[in-house]
Image: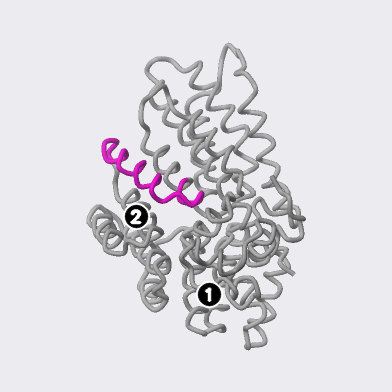
């Protein structure tokens, strides 16, 4: 449901917050009381002096106003440019795939072909190439269905694993776009009977976090331990604990994740998570410290972009607008469309477009805001 106009849908969260508060007949003081947020912070959001860069506050505001989080973030955003339009179209194609009966094709693609297509889609996801991922997904999921239906007994387990991976990739893209209902449906479709699949559980936890439901995310994360959870699930659980304001529990989970990491990439991901968790419980200085300590070279484009966005928001919180702008420009270079579709990145872009003093950086951030549909 979108009762507000599409122009508001593309703008900062504060503008939408003010409109929804008035629709609900609440005063700012009443909203602050319902959420436990400071009145000055709520007022700052609505007047544009403040911005949202943490999941906890936006979840609290949405709950107080009886809204889905997407009603405040404005997702899915109106298409801006051909690449964004192509990515948005994937929701239509995947919705059709969800409701269309499986074809009775007597023979399906070879397992090797499915593996190659799945690997290419996973690479696009890792680099943050949303367009390539979106273009590949509908055919990939159909190919996976056919392969599972026609593969010999010896190849069934591998075919099912690849099918699950394809569905999880699709659900991840739908979640990032804001089609969270479709993402949940795709994850449900990925389950082979009642068997718990770790990749599905991981994406379900991500989805529950994005829906602003940290307690549900933690309950789902507990089930992952029985499915052989590695380093990633404690990281997500730490984010959920930070959303709920439980810093000590979050730190313990991050220590668990660090102990389970087995490669430079995984260790870099845990350090990046430490930055995100510190930002979530409001310690901007610590977030910047972790971001500087992370091995950027070990991170994929998508994760590098996300870490740089967290660092930009933390720098902005410490009134270092130029440093924050420089981080944003780096994040955009790492994964452009992934950055522009991130609601918290959009918040920082909107803020820095007016606060950056360095001429070259200010021009770059304004250009980024225009490409994101924020100006």
- Which numbered disc, 2 or 1, marks the residue that appears first in the sequence? 2
At label 2, counting other C-alpha atoms closer than 10 Å, the crowd grade (few under 14, some 14-19, many 20 or more) is many
Residue at the spot 55% in from the left edge and 49% down from the top edge = 124
Q: Residue at horizontal 41%, vertical 51%?
A: 214
Find residue 49 and report its image quarter: bottom right
Location of residue 192 in the rendering, given as x and y in whole percent from the top left corner: 42, 24
Quadrant, the C terminus: bottom right
Around disc 1, counting alpha carbons within 10 Å, would you say few (fewer than 14), some (14 to 19), or many (20 or more)? Answer: many
Residue contact at pointers 2 and 1, CB within 8 angstroms: no
> Between residues 220 and 122, which one lies in front from this camera angle?
220
Q: Is residue 158 above or below residue 7?
A: above
- Left or right? Give the position of 208 relative to 271: right
Find residue 101 and report its horizontal and vertical position in percent.
62, 18
Q: Position of residue 187 (x, y in %)?
A: 49, 34
Q: Main secondary structure of the magenta part?
A: helix
Give the label on residue 235, or none.
Answer: 2
Label placed on residue 110: none
Q: Quadrant of the N terminus?
A: top right
Magenta segment, which residues?
208-228
In this view of the protein, which residue sits in the foreground, 255 or 223?
223
Per the image, label 2 sits on a secondary structure element best described as: helix
Which label lies toward us, 2 or 1? Answer: 2
Q: Is residue 244 left or right of residue 341?
A: left
Quarter location, residue 268? bottom left
Q: Which is more toward the observer, 299 or 224?
A: 224
- Residue 244: where, in percent of width, then height? 38, 58
Q: CA distance from mark 2 to mark 1?
A: 23 Å
Disc marking residue 327: 1
């Amino acid at each position: 449901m979108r009762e507000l106009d599409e122009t508001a849908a593309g703008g900062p969260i504060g503008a939408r917050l003010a409109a929804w508060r008035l629709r609900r007949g609440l005063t700012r003081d009443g909203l602050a009381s319902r959420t436990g947020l400071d009145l000055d912070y709520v007022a700052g959001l609505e007047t544009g002096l403040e911005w949202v860069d943490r999941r906890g506050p936006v979840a609290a505001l949405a709950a107080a106003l009886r809204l889905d989080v997407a009603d405040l973030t404005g997702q899915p955003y109106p298409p801006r440019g051909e690449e964004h339009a192509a990515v948005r179209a994937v929701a239509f194609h995947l919705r059709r795939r969800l409701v269309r009966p499986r074809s009775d094709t007597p023979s399906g693609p070879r397992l090797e072909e499915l593996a190659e297509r799945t690997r290419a889609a996973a690479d696009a996801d890792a680099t943050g190439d949303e367009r390539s991922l979106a273009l590949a997904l509908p055919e990939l999921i159909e190919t996976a269905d056919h392969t599972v239906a026609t593969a010999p007994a010896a190849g069934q387990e591998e075919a099912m694993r690849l099918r699950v991976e394809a569905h999880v990739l699709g659900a991840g893209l739908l979640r990032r776009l804001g089609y969270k209902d479709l993402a949940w449906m795709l994850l449900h479709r990925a389950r082979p009977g009642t068997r718990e699949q770790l990749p599905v559980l991981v994406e379900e936890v991500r989805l529950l976090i994005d829906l602003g439901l940290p307690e549900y995310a933690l309950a789902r994360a507990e089930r992952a331990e029985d499915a052989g959870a590695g380093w990633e699930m404690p990281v997500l659980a730490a984010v959920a604990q930070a959303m709920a304001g439980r810093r000590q529990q979050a730190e313990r989970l991050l220590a668990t994740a660090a102990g389970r990491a087995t490669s430079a990439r995984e260790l870099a991901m845990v350090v990046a998570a430490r930055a995100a968790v510190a930002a979530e419980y409001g310690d901007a200085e610590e977030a910047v410290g972790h971001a500087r300590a992370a091995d950027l070279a070990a991170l994929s484009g998508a994760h590098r972009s996300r870490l740089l966005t967290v660092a930009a928001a933390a720098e902005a919180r410490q009134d270092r607008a130029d440093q924050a702008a420089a981080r944003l420009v780096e994040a955009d270079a790492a994964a452009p469309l992934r950055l522009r579709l991130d609601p918290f990145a959009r918040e920082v872009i909107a803020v820095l477009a007016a606060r950056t003093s360095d001429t070259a950086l200010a021009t770059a951030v304004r250009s980024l805001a225009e490409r994101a549909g924020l100006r």
